[in-house]
Image (cartoon, grey):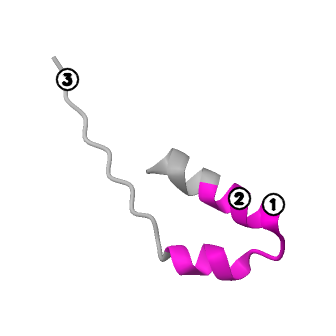
Amino acid sequence: MSEYLIAVSVGPVQNFIAAARATHDLWFGSYVLSEVS
């Protein structure tokens, strides 16, 4: 049986929050980060 290990590193979350210009930007950034992690 093959075994795989995938590591994903998410950068500083503060950059996503600072880049949000509107509420939907903040929501979408939060959604994407939660799906990735």
Tell me the quarter of the picture where residue 10 sits: bottom left
| Residue located farthest toward the front when viewing the structure as drawn | 23
Q: Report the amino acid beneath label 2.
A: Trp
Query: Is 33 included in the stretch rendered in magenta?
Result: no
Query: Is 29 included in the stretch rendered in magenta?
Result: yes
Which circle's residue, 3 or 2, is located before the other in the chain? 3
Q: Which residue is mark 2?
A: 27
Which one is in front, 24 or 7?
A: 24
Separation of marks 3 and 2 at Cα, in angstroms: 38 Å
Q: Which residue is drawn at the image coordinates 61% and 59% (left, top)?
A: 30
Q: Secondary structure at mark 1?
A: helix
Separation of marks 2 and 1 at Cα, in angstroms: 5 Å
Q: Which residue is drawn at the image coordinates 25% and 41% (left, top)?
A: 5
Image spot of residue 28 (x, y percent) = 71, 56
Nearer the viewer's eye, disc 1 or disc 3? Answer: 1
The quadrant of the image that shows the N terminus is top left
Kindly check if marks 2 and 1 are in contact, taking CB atoms under 8 A apart as contact: yes
Is 22 on the left-hand or right-hand side of 8? right
Label 2 CA crowd tier, 10 Å (few <14, some 14–19, many 20+): few
Q: Report the amino acid beneath label 3.
A: Ser
Q: Which residue is mark 1?
A: 24
Looking at the rendering, the stretch of residues picked out in magenta corresponds to 13-30
Q: Secondary structure at mark 3?
A: loop
Q: Report the amino acid beneath label 1.
A: His
Q: Which residue is mark 3?
A: 2
Label 1 CA crowd tier, 10 Å (few <14, some 14–19, many 20+): few
Is 25 on the left-hand or right-hand side of 17? right
Q: Which residue is drawn at the image coordinates 71% and 58% (left, top)?
A: 27
